[in-house]
Amino acid sequence: RRQVREADQKRKPPMKTKPACFDTLVARYYCSIYSFALRITDDPLEAVLLTHHAFNSTRKQLRSRRDEAVIVIMLVAAVIQGLNARGFN
């Protein structure tokens, strides 16, 4: 049994999961999206909420996107939509 388990472990390298890819995306763009929201709202708490909303609302759409420019545009658009929903004009 031990030999079979060891052989399986050697053949199957750990794979990146989708949540790990999303975490990488958040790590890469969180500061930029937060800064954008903060400049618009001038309220740190509101900026955090908008940034969180932007990533959550685009999460499903981000899975199929590979072009980083499109990803950034989607995140900025989500912040703007969140502003409109909260009554900022």
Image (cartoon, grey):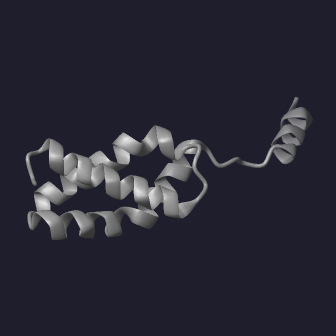
Classify the position of the N terminus by image quarter. top right
Instruction: Using the rendered view, name the quadrant where residue 63 is placed.
Output: top right
Left of 26 or right of it: where is 31? left
Number of numbered discs visible in the structure rendering: 0
60 up-or-down from 43: above or below: above
Left of 4 or right of it: where is 20? left
Q: Residue at x 78, y 49 (%)?
A: 13
x and y, in percent, of residue 79 in the image: 27, 53
- From the viewer's side, name the closer residue of 20 and 76: 76
Q: Residue at x 50, y 57 (%)?
A: 70
- From the viewer's side, name the closer residue of 28 and 57: 57
Which residue sits furthest front? 89
- From the viewer's side, name the closer residue of 20 and 46: 46
Classify the position of the C terminus by image quarter. bottom left
Q: Residue at x 70, y 47 (%)?
A: 15
x and y, in percent, of residue 88 in the image: 9, 52
Q: Residue at x 85, y 47 (%)?
A: 10
x and y, in percent, of residue 44 in the image: 13, 63
x and y, in percent, of residue 6 in the image: 85, 41
Which residue sits furthest top? 1
Left of 46 or right of it: where is 8? right
- From the viewer's side, name the closer residue of 13 and 27: 27
